[in-house]
């Protein structure tokens, strides 16, 4: 089959490479326009673009795919059999969905209809789920609502964060996609309508999503830390400066038998980190980054800033 591939970030680039290794016929790659990133606002291009350039694939980066006759004409001229979308970052309008012979399929990092939307991995972690997965479905104009072709469950381990879980999911996604493509090509594909009554959503995260409320239970705060480890990163404040928290562990034993205030530093655990009281239970912070500084072990913060028991990390 002749494919057109739409995708942008690193995980999508990994899927594109798998398709290339499987000798799939990729007529063109479509990715987001180059954009400035980082403090220096240096213009950089997507991981998918990098793979496309290295592989000599035709590449398009339209500012918009909606109401874009030139782009639609280009896509139509390729006469594709199928479109494959992996984290492209934009909703495709019906005028584009109808171009390939078999329409478009999408690789989504949840077990649909749960966690439709832009941040399914992060929301699964935020909600303390023990399982998520990968779903391949046919694209329709409604958000992640098309019929399902294939899915595979993946357990969420206690040590998982957004980074490790993304890798686990996309390690599964590649083989699942190649299997699905073979089924479409041979006519063995079967579609299952999603149950709308079971649909949940995973909306776009904001910078404010990282704010920690120490009045919440320790388990809930820990889930926020591991869900947002890539962006926007969970944070509190230490002596008026933003303190990002990359890793924390639930403290099962109550080491300090006294009344504690949420956000209070109650123990400095040598070579391990900073024990903080929450609304229910305690949390051991082990990797942090103070505003303007590099990421370090939390106990190094204790040594470098003479952290004291009883100090409060505000909500």
Image (cartoon, rainbow, N blue to C red):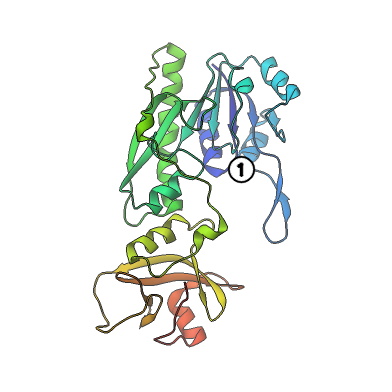
Q: Is residue 131 left or right of residue 146?
A: left
All told, the count of numbered labels is 1
| Element type at mark 1 | helix
Q: Position of residue 150 (x, y in %)?
A: 38, 27
Q: Quadrant of residue 310?
A: bottom left
| Image-quadrant location for residue 294 | bottom right
Return the residue found at the far top: 187
Q: Is residue 303 above or below residue 118?
A: below
Q: Nearer the viewer, residue 118 or 289?
A: 118
Q: At which x and y percent is residue 12? A: 54, 38
* Relative depth, front residue between 20 and 264: 264
Residue 270 in view, yes or no: no
Residue farthest toward the front in the current orientation of the protein: 197
- In the rendered image, residue 105, in percent from the top left (x then y), is placed at 50, 25
Residue at position x 54%, y 16% in the image? 1
Q: Residue at x 68, y 36 (%)?
A: 53
- Give the residue displayed 30% in from the left and 48% down from the top: 130
| Residue that appears at 71% across and 33% down | 62
How crowded pointer 1 is (Cα within 10 Å; few <14, some 14-19, many 20+) is rated as some
Residue 33 lies left or right of residue 289; in this view the side is right
Q: For this rendering, which residue is in front, 174 or 263?
A: 263
The residue tagged 1 is: 47
Q: Quick check: can you spot residue 288?
A: yes
Please, which residue is most extreme toward the right here?
70
Q: Quadrant of residue 176?
A: top left
Looking at the image, residue 90 lies above or below residue 39: above
Q: Position of residue 218 (x, y in %)?
A: 34, 66
Can you say whether 21 is above or below 244 in the image?
A: above
Residue 242 drawn above or below residue 189? below
């Amino acid at each position: 089959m002749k494919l057109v591939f739409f995708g942008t970030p690193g995980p999508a680039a990994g899927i594109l490479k798998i398709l290339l290794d499987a000798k799939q016929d990729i007529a063109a790659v479509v990715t987001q326009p180059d954009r400035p990133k980082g403090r220096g606002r240096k213009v950089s291009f997507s991981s998918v673009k990098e793979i496309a350039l290295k592989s000599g694939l035709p590449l398009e980066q339209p500012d918009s795919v909606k109401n874009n006759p030139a782009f639609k004409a280009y896509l139509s001229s390729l006469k594709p059999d199928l479109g494959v979308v992996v984290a492209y970052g934009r909703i495709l309008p019906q005028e584009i969905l109808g171009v390939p012979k078999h329409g478009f399929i999408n690789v989504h990092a949840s077990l649909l209809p749960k966690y439709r939307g832009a941040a399914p991995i992060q929301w699964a972690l935020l909600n303390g789920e023990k399982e998520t997965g990968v779903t391949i479905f046919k694209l329709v104009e409604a958000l992640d609502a098309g019929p399902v072709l294939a899915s595979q469950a993946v357990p969420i381990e206690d040590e998982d964060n957004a980074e490790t879980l993304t890798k686990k999911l996309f390690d599964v996604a590649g083989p699942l996609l190649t299997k699905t493509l073979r089924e479409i090509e041979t006519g063995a594909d079967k579609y299952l309508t999603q149950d709308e009554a079971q649909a949940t959503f995973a909306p776009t995260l904001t910078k404010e999503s990282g704010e920690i409320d120490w009045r919440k239970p320790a388990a809930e705060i820990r889930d926020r830390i591991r869900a947002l480890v890539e962006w926007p990163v969970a944070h509190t404040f230490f002596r008026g400066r933003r303190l990002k928290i990359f890793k924390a562990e639930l403290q099962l034993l109550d080491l300090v038998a006294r009344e504690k205030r949420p956000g209070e530093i109650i123990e400095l655990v040598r070579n391990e980190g900073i024990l903080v009281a929450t609304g229910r239970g305690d949390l051991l912070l082990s990797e942090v980054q103070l505003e303007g500084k590099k990421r370090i072990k939390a106990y190094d913060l204790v040594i470098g800033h003479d952290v004291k028991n009883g100090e409060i990390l505000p909500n």
